[in-house]
Image (cartoon, grey):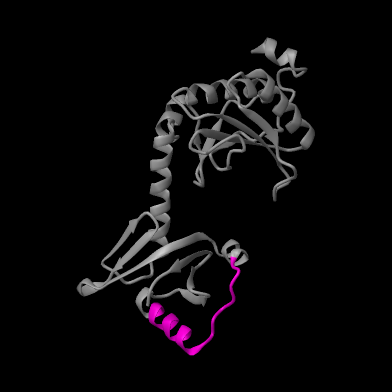
Amino acid sequence: MANRILKEGLRADDLQDLVSHVFEIDRYASKMGEDRDVAVLSFKVKDRSPAQDMMEFIEKGYSFVLDSDVSSGEDAKGNYHVFVEIPRNKSLPRFIGEIADGVQRLTGNRDWKFRYYKKHNAVPFSEERITETVPMTPEAYDTMMEGYRVEGIQKFFNNTYKDELIVEGNKITVVKPFGVKISFNMLQFADADQLEKDLTETVKMDSRSQAEVMWLTKLLGDMSINKYGDSFVLENGKRAMKISMEI
């Protein structure tokens, strides 16, 4: 590893105190392929120049790295991000371990932690922990993402009085007391600000549309509902869902 560092023009501890000891996995989308096939690591670096040095070291030093890049600008805290894309397969823990070991020599970081996907808590890094936490096959990734998706949908309807919520692909069925069921198709589920930007229709304010909105509000509970064209937009906090249904 030391020869690799010298070859790339960097010496041990050249990036000391410049790279966060917490890195992220699968928080950002891959540029090289489908997320189910490619895992993306993200390291936070305090300035663009050391971020560029670190990116070049990783890209040239590891044959399994598909791509490495630096964010075009700073994040809200003034840091740059070094993105590293690697294949999602059974060797993933070893690949990440090799990168962590190499970057450790540049930074002096010996207490690596990682944060997976959108979780807030960082956990101590080890190859065993990666194996337990990160999906290592496309199929495992698909299963995990579907679990997160269903969990998010269930949370979105947390204020809806119901006996059961059934999610089958994009079809959602709310089962009310006494066996009453309301089914609809989910067209989009995103942050409210993003969904609002994507809307091409205007709010319908005619009496029939408003009656439909009132009916839905009574059934679905404490959330904001409006009709846009032939669809309805439900808002609960910072999340929004666009649905279609026959009324």
x%, y% of residue 144? 40, 42
- Give left or right: position of 46 versus 226: right
- Is 138 drawn above or below residue 77 in the view shown? above
Q: Residue at x 38, y 70 (%)?
A: 159
Residue 87 horizontal/vertical position (percent): 53, 28
Left or right of 199? Residue 107 is right
Q: Quadrant of the N terminus?
A: top right
Looking at the rendering, in which quadrant would you find the C terminus? Answer: bottom left
Queried whether the magenta region covers residue 200, the answer comes back as: yes
The answer to whether 33 is drawn above or below residue 152 in the figure is above
Depth check: give the residue in front, 210 or 72: 210
Which residue is located at x 43 percent, y 62 percent?
A: 186
Find the magenta span and give its range: 199-217
**Which image quadrant is residue 211 in?**
bottom left
Q: Residue at x 42, y 41 (%)?
A: 142
Residue that lies at the very extreme toward the left in this rendered image: 178
- Residue 58 horizontal/vertical position (percent): 66, 24
